[in-house]
Amino acid sequence: MSDLPILTGHLAGFEDTIAATREKREELYKWFHQHPELSMEEYATSQRIEEVLNEIGFTVTAVGKTGKVGVLENGEGPVVAFRADFDALPIAEDTGLEYSADPALNKMHACGHDMHTTALLGAAEALAKHKDLWSGTFIALFQPGEETGAGAQDMADSGLADKIVKPDVVLGQHIGPWIDNYGVGALAGPVFATCVQTKITLYGRGSHGSMPHLSVDPVVLAAKIIMSLQTIVSRGINPQDMGVVTVGAVHGGDSPNTVPDSVEIKVSTRAYTQELSDKLNKDIRRIVRGECEIAGCDREPTFEIVGGAPVFSNHQAPTNTVMAAFNEQFGDQVGDFGRLCGSEDFPTIAEAWGAPYFYWAVGSKQNIAGEPYNHSPKFAPDLDPVLDLTTRTILVGVSPWLMSR
């Protein structure tokens, strides 16, 4: 096994359980990896999570379509929640691992959620076996549907805050090739970007391809709009601010000899503040409506929000607290991954309770240069040492609240 630092001091007592459960955790991780399920369809995964939580003595509550929350009470003390996501992506795996998911499934854990889930179950078992080392209440929250942005909202809308005791802090982590040497850490403030995903339908007037003068061509209109949208960031926002506008899909017509009636465009935006996100999306609607009017469309375009994620800004106090614990336990391994333009719905869980939150990264490779990134069909964290490391980081992360020195 890896020679990365093990837990020391008041946390050293957990190491026997980490060693004793290693084989079981590896088998569980491989099961999750080989049985990927897409967002909001994670029925077998959800059931397996519940079975493990019941086995180790947690009280389990179903929240939402497939979400599961395990609670372990251990006397007086703070309440700490830790969230792991467990959905997969519609990607055919190409890692070559002996425990690879069948590529014919066209489903893969290409973002490490199988590792997140196994690590939380491992930390939960360590806490259950060592009640003498901590006091308070630990909430192990397993969230579906992160990849579509639907899972956290589903749990919040399904009464998370009413069904589960309010925590003093909500913690989470994500693996990826973000910090060299299996580094651990993050920073306060903006970490991920808020995201809005919109389906826009442009309504033209169909015609025979030989009679374009009788049409209002939504394909040409879509092309103009796509180019015009590129000016929002280049000319509409302060160059010192981060903003992204992406047209990710265009669909219209089926025949090369027909002007279709409509075209569908799917657009996403990213920003670090709600104000800038609102501006980007207001500008998109202004440009689309303006181009439709210029083209002479008979119908107004429609806009449907189909996904997204909230503003993600780590709170200062828990950041300071957890990073101090990381520095004590992991030393030179501790760093941060800067800020990413990607998005995460983790804050929705914490905000359902109105609780502060901190979310960190764990490096999935020793040397990250050139490694396949998350969402790649070749993405594969190093099972050793990442599985043990991510279990340890959870225990270290919750220790300032639950474990007396």
Image (tube, rainbow, N blue to C red):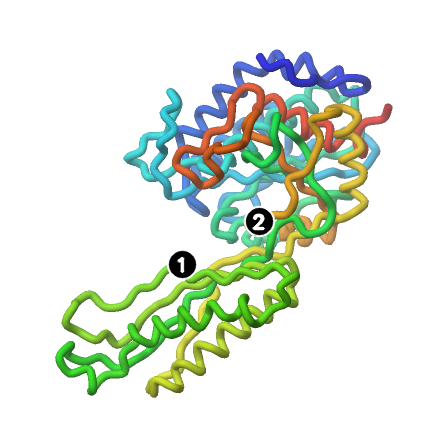
**Mark 1 highlights which residue?**
248
Asked whether the viewer can see residue 233, the reply is yes
Q: How many marks?
A: 2
- Residue shown at 23% from the left, 83% from the top: 215
Judge left or right: residue 60 versus residue 303: right
Q: Nearer the viewer, residue 227 or 339?
A: 227
**Residue type, label 2:** Glu
> Which label lies toward us, 2 or 1?
1
How much space separates mark 2 and mark 1, taking CA atoms?
18 Å
Q: Quadrant of the C terminus?
A: top right
Asked whether the viewer can see residue 170, the reply is no
Going from the N terminus, do you reach mark 2 or mark 1 first? 1
Query: In the rendered image of this protein, does residue 353 appear above or below residue 380?
Result: below
Query: In the rendered image of this protein, does residue 50 appear above or below residue 221?
Result: above
Image location (x, y in percent) of residue 274:
64, 64
**Mark 2 highlights which residue?**
344
Few, some or many residues within 10 Å of mark 2 (<14, 14–19, 20+):
many
- Residue shown at 52% from the left, 52% from the top: 149
- Helix, strand or loop at mark 1: strand
